[in-house]
Image: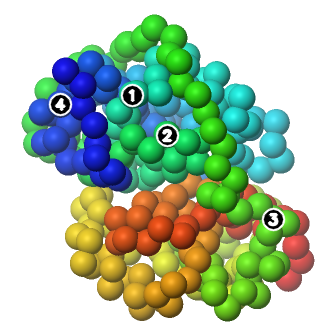
Amino acid sequence: MKVNLDSRAAVSVEWLNKHIEAENLLVFNASILKVTDDGYANADQRQIPHTQFFDIKKAFSDVSGEFPNTIPSEEQFQSEARKLGINDDSTIIVYDDKGIYSSARVWWLFKTFGHDNVAILDGGLPEWLRQDLPTEDKQINRKLKGDFNARFIRDNVVYFKDLEALSEDKAVTILDARSSDRFNCEVPEPRAGLRRGTIPNSKNLPYADCLKDGKLKPKTELQAIFKERVAENDTLVFSCGSGITACILDLAATMAGYEDTKVYDGSWTEYGSLTKE
């Protein structure tokens, strides 16, 4: 039997456990290290059944790009997705080992390459383990090559060349997902050599403000959070350090009912490197 997400952007661990054997369901672990982390990503030795590893850093980024986590080409995304057995009718669930962190980046990538039947696992692996749901030893779980056809949606992405006009547009709000002390230049940036600063006319919304115990806050709370910072009909542009947690804001805004949203792919790492104070 096949399963469909019916426009859900996030599913509970209970939902995934109920549908884990659906024939068109694919489950991905997209864990990565934060720039401040010690150790290594994807370190847990147990995983949700049928999991495959979704390699954001190598397979699904432009590794030749000047800045980290650069969005790949349409051709690269399609090729790597097919290697994971992804088909046009696949239902995709993505999780990570922090609750909600890099999984949101994968959700955004799939939406940006034309596949809407994708959701993050709310609470991720920690919530799955907390509820003592079934796991398996870490393994590869290879699939047959898929038939997924990528379709790049340019309107989902903001590039450096777009920013000057967007930052001056009164109908656009740029929200920065970095912590308040980084946004306010009270602490150094964690990346060596990267200057402190902010994109002109941007506002701060730390991604952690949209989460509680590793899960998304309820819709009504998310709506209130965005309403404090955003005019009702604004276009929303999300930035962060390197394009990962900006996608958490995009996810939260989607859950809150916003539709006109974009992610600045290069985020502060690019902007701070290409501009002077």
Residue 85, image x and y in percent? 46, 17
Dot 1 alpha-carbon crowd within 10 angstroms: few under 14, some 14 to 19, many 20 or more: many
Q: Helix, strand, or loop for circle 3?
A: helix
Can you tell which of label 2 and label 3 is closer to the viewer? 2
- Residue topped by disc 4: 19
Residue under circle 3?
A: 160
Badge 2 or badge 4: first in the primary sequence:
4
- What amino acid is at disc 1? Ser
Q: Earlier in the sequence, mark 3 or mark 4?
A: 4
CA distance separating discs 1 and 2? 9 Å
Report the residue that reaches farthest toward the top: 144
Q: Are marks 1 and 2 in contact (CB under 8 Å)?
A: yes
Left or right, 230 with reference to 66: left
- 268 is higher (above) or lower (below) than 86: below
Q: Residue at x 40, y 27 (%)?
A: 89
Q: Are marks 2 and 4 in contact (CB under 8 Å)?
A: no
Identify the residue shown where x is 24% and y is 78%.
220
Mark 4 and mark 1: Cα distance apart in space: 13 Å
Could you tell me how far apart the alpha carbons at marks 2 and 4 are, in whole angstroms?
20 Å
SS class, disc 1: loop
* Kind of residue at disc 3: Phe
Q: Which residue is mark 1?
A: 90
Q: Residue at x 49, y 63 (%)?
A: 250
The amino acid on which the numbered mark 2 sits, given as a three-letter code, is: His
* Position of residue 228 measured from the top left corner of the image (x, y, whole percent): 42, 91
Quadrant where the C terminus lies?
Answer: bottom right
